[in-house]
């Protein structure tokens, strides 16, 4: 199996150790908290599952602008889109630890704890620059542009410890897999070469045939189907 992107070992940010997770949840009770928007919460879940390897947390402004323009962070790591935590909340100070709360679960439980490395103001021009680079349009009717432009004008960056996978495990117990679980299942099957197919639509016959053709032509052991349904 090939190495994870950007590192020798997969770096999921979810805290699997139960004692450490319990201690962090206890600490979160005394920390200032931030109710995340859905985009930042989704990023935390993805960071927790190891999908955004090798990131250790949310990107700062320099990395976000660089990724938007060149698909590389300031230090040269390939990454397709900025992974950000944007807000309009005030009073958050660089150097503090804060509890990040889940907007998508009743009661807004703690989703992660963040070490705030930087708090940076983002101008409208910078928001538009990133949006146009990412979505290739500034049309406000584009849902990606509309969402990105409404996340806030303060960027919080820094490493996080993820304490929950939000509602995904509960709502999708049969299909939700972290990157760790996916790689483990591939290893358990003894597969050395795998065809991966990602789709935002339910699979239809043409998709199935494409996967079969790739499986045969590449002499692969199996197929990983990653569905993003919304």
Image: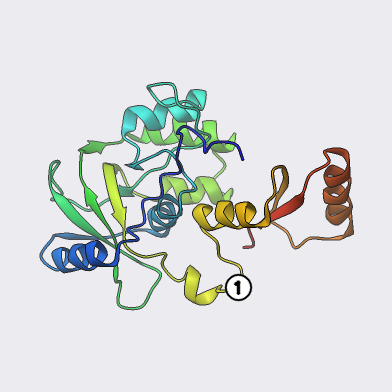
Give the residue number, with chain letter if any, for mark 1: 174
Picture coordinates of residue 49 (x, y %)?
A: 45, 54
Picture coordinates of residue 78 (x, y %)?
A: 50, 28
**Which of 142/4 is in front?**
4
Give the secondary structure at mark 1. Answer: loop
**Which of 7/107 is in front?**
7
Answer with left or right where residue 160 lies relative to residue 138. Answer: left
Q: Residue at the spot x=26%, y=64% of the render?
A: 21
Q: From the viewer's perspective, is residue 86 above or below residue 26?
A: above
**Which of 176/98 is in front?**
176
In which quadrant of the rendered view does residue 54 lie? top left
Picture coordinates of residue 220 (x, y %)?
A: 79, 44
Picture coordinates of residue 193 (x, y %)?
A: 72, 42
Quadrant where the image shows the C terminus:
bottom right
Answer with left or right where residue 153 lies relative to residue 169. Answer: left
In which quadrant of the rendered view does residue 107 lie? bottom left
């Amino acid at each position: 199996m090939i190495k994870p992107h950007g590192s020798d070992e997969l770096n999921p940010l979810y805290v699997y150790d139960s004692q450490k997770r319990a201690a962090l949840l206890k600490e979160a009770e005394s920390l200032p908290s931030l109710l995340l928007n859905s985009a930042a919460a989704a990023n935390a879940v993805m960071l927790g599952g190891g999908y955004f390897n090798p990131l250790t947390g949310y990107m700062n402004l320099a990395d976000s602008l660089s990724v938007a323009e060149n698909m590389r962070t300031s230090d040269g790591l390939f990454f397709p889109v900025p992974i950000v935590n944007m807000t309009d909340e005030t009073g958050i100070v660089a150097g503090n630890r804060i509890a990040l709360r889940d907007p998508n679960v009743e009661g807004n439980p703690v989703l992660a704890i963040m070490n705030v490395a930087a708090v940076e103001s983002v101008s409208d021009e910078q928001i538009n620059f990133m949006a146009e680079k990412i979505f290739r349009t500034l049309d406000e009717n584009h849902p990606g542009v509309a969402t990105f432009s409404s996340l806030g004008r303060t960027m919080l960056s820094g490493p996080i410890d993820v304490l929950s996978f939000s509602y995904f495990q509960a709502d999708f117990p049969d299909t939700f897999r972290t990157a760790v679980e996916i790689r483990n299942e591939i290893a358990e099957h003894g597969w050395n070469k795998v065809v991966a197919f990602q789709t935002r639509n339910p699979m239809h016959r043409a998709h199935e045939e494409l996967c079969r053709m790739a499986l045969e032509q590449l002499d692969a052991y199996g197929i990983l189907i990653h569905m993003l349904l919304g």
